[in-house]
Each structure stands twice: as C-alpha cells, then as structure tokens.
C-alpha cells in the first residue's frame, strides 16, 4: 500500500503579483527539473498544508502549491473584492507563465477538483493530465444537498444547531440568512453563525471522526473571514453557469485523467464522480469503498499516491 512521501520543504517561495490588491503565495518543492504539478486546495479558503507536498515523489515532480486569493498565506487574508473563480484561473496562468512552464499536471480535490476542470476547459493545451479527487460539479443540486435538503437527514442534530444559530429572519433560504448574519452588525450572531457553519462542515466531512468543540471555544476573526469567503462563493453560484463543468467536458476527452472518489463521501456524493466519468469516458475511475471526503486515510492516500506515481512513469 502506498503512503505519503517524506516531509520536504520548499526550495522557492514568492508572492505573485496579480494586478489587484491580492498577493498570492506560491511555493515550489521537489525536483526543479521534474514534472510540473500544481496542487489545488479545496474550500474555498482552506489553503494549502505542508502534507500536500507529500502526494508527489520529490525526485520526479516539481511540486507547485499556492494559496488561492484571500486564503492561507496569501494577502490580504479574507479579501473578497476581485476574488472570483475566473480570478483564480487567471492566477494559475500567471503562475505557469512566471515559472516558465509549458504544460503541467493538475491535481485538485473538492472545490479544487472543480477549479482544475474549469482551468482545463479554458487552457486544455496547458494540461498534460489531471488527478481529480472528490468530484464537486458546482451544480445547484450539489450545494442544495449540503445546505438545504440532503445530508441534513444524516446529521439532523448538527443541522439543528446550525439552524438555531441564525437570528430569526424566516430561514427560507439558509445561505441568504447565513450571509445576513455574517455581514450584519451583531458581532455575537456573526461569530455564532461562523462557528456552527464550520462545525456543520466538519461533521459532514469527517463523519464519525468529527470531534465537536466546546461551547466556550473562541471564534476568531480569521474563522469568520474564512466562512465569509466560503459563502461569498456559494451565494454567487461559484461565479459559473449552472452545469457549466459537465457541459464543457467534451473538450477534455484527450487529456489523461484519473478520477478518485470515496463511496462514503457525504460532502460530494459519489453520483458526481459517476457523472464526471460519463462525461470523460477516457478517464480512469476509481471508487474507494471505505473512503470519505477528505484526502486522508490509508485507502485514499494509497489511491492518490498511486495516481501520481502512475503519471510520473507515463509523462
């Protein structure tokens, strides 16, 4: 069974100038002359982590991580102006050009999977292959499952706590009500909603491994900004048209692709993985019977590292 590669440190870091107020953190590790691969984190607003470098053999890969606008080490943290899906795609192209890379492997999970597909649909000539984990197709039904009617039936207790965190404003549109509280003047309500939204996401993503915090846990300004960014994208339908990803997949059928999805994923149900494979029949489609949403656990790590090792041999 494959495991993560040993810990490594970047050999080059910089802040990408974007022509806006955003400065995007970028790092390179591994082999400077290796196969370029760009890692796309989820969220939005989760940021990259040192272990994300470890999915790739550092002898064979030039590993590129970046924190999307307003995320991680990118500055200013939580900034929403000039922060759209197209801005992120344009940042990827700026990174590629800055590093003088002709083509690269694109690796993304969850929101990062959606971003990978959207980038490839605009720049297919720059993508030598894709590894797509935990498929998120950014359809209304996908967000409704998470925030309206779907997984709330699996975790009704946590869902009820989220609903009760919202000031009484009708509750007909959860996202609208969450946003009203998050951008409202009541700081107590703002922090309460941010805390319960993060708890909801943690419960759905981690399942039985989720460990709820105590009621007295402090909610930081950074946590509020992170939730605001997630909902900034959600309330704008992630700045794309309904079903845009699936409708444009025909132009990607010549790109070697591996799709990996956990059967137990309750954030992005496996129906999305099946739909993407139907749109990309050339792709290798791997279903992990016991894996969930996150890129952790023996089964998921084995599949992801096996996928990067396979591309390392073929590219």
Image (cartoon, rainbow, N blue to C red):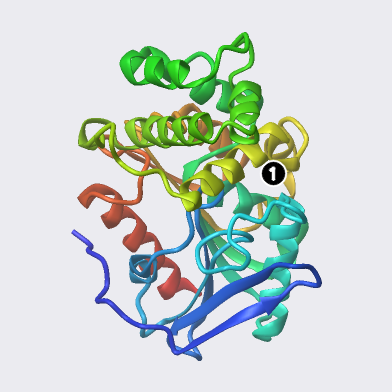
Q: Residues within 10 Å of mark 1 (few under 14, many from 20)?
A: some
Q: Nearer the viewer, residue 263 or 79?
A: 79
Instruction: Measuring from the top left, give residue 55's x and y in whole percent.
Output: 35, 66
Q: Nearer the viewer, residue 44 or 298?
A: 44
Which of the 4 image quadrants contains residue 96? bottom right
Determine whether 302 is above or below 169 in the image. below
Instruction: Measuring from the top left, give residue 239's x and y in whole percent.
Output: 75, 41
- The residue labelled by disc 1 is 249
Residue in the image at 24% along x and 48% along y:
299
The quarter of the rendered structure image containing the N terminus is bottom left
Q: Residue furthest right?
A: 19
Determine whether 246 is above or below 282 in the image. above
Instruction: Answer left or right for 25 relative to 240.
Output: left
Residue in the image at 55% along x and 68% along y:
105
Residue in the image at 45% along x and 21% along y:
165
Q: Nearer the viewer, residue 80 or 298?
A: 80
Helix, strand or loop at label 1? It is helix
Instruction: Measuring from the top left, give residue 313's x and y in whole percent.
Output: 41, 74
Instruction: Measuring from the top left, give residue 75's x and y in whole percent.
Output: 61, 68
* Residue 109 visible in the snapshot: no
* Residue 203 visible in the snapshot: yes
Determine whether 192 is above or below 86 in the image. above
Q: What count of labels does the image hold?
A: 1
């Amino acid at each position: 069974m494959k495991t993560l590669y040993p810990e490594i440190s970047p050999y080059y870091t910089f802040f990408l100038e974007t022509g806006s107020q955003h400065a995007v953190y970028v790092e390179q590790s591994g082999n400077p002359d290796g196969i370029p691969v760009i890692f796309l984190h989820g969220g939005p607003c989760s940021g990259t982590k040192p272990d994300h470098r470890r999915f790739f053999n550092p002898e064979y890969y030039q590993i590129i991580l970046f924190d999307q606008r307003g995320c991680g080490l990118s500055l200013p943290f939580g900034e929403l102006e000039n922060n759209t899906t197209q801005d992120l795609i344009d940042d990827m192209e700026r990174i590629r050009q800055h590093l003088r890379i002709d083509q690269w492997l694109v690796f993304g999970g969850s929101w990062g999977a959606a971003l990978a597909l959207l980038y490839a649909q605009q720049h297919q000539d720059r993508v030598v292959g894709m590894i797509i984990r935990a498929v998120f197709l950014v359809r209304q039904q996908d967000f409704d499952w998470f925030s309206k009617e779907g997984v709330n039936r699996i975790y009704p207790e946590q869902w009820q706590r989220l609903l009760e965190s919202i000031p009484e404003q009708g509750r007909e549109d959860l996202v609208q009500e969450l946003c009203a509280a998050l951008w409202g003047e009541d700081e107590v309500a703002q922090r309460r909603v941010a805390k319960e939204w993060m708890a909801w996401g943690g419960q759905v993503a981690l399942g039985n491994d989720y460990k709820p915090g105590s009621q007295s846990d402090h909610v930081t300004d950074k946590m509020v900004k992170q939730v605001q960014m997630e909902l900034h994208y959600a309330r704008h339908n992630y700045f794309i048209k309904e079903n845009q990803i699936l409708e444009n997949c025909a132009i990607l059928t010549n790109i070697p692709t591996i799709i990996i999805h956990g059967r137990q994923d309750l954030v992005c149900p496996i129906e999305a993985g099946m739909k993407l494979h139907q749109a990309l029949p050339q792709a290798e489609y791997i279903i992990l019977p016991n894996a969930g949403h996150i890129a952790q656990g023996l089964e998921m790590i084995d599949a992801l590292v096996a996928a990067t090792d396979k591309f390392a041999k073929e590219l």
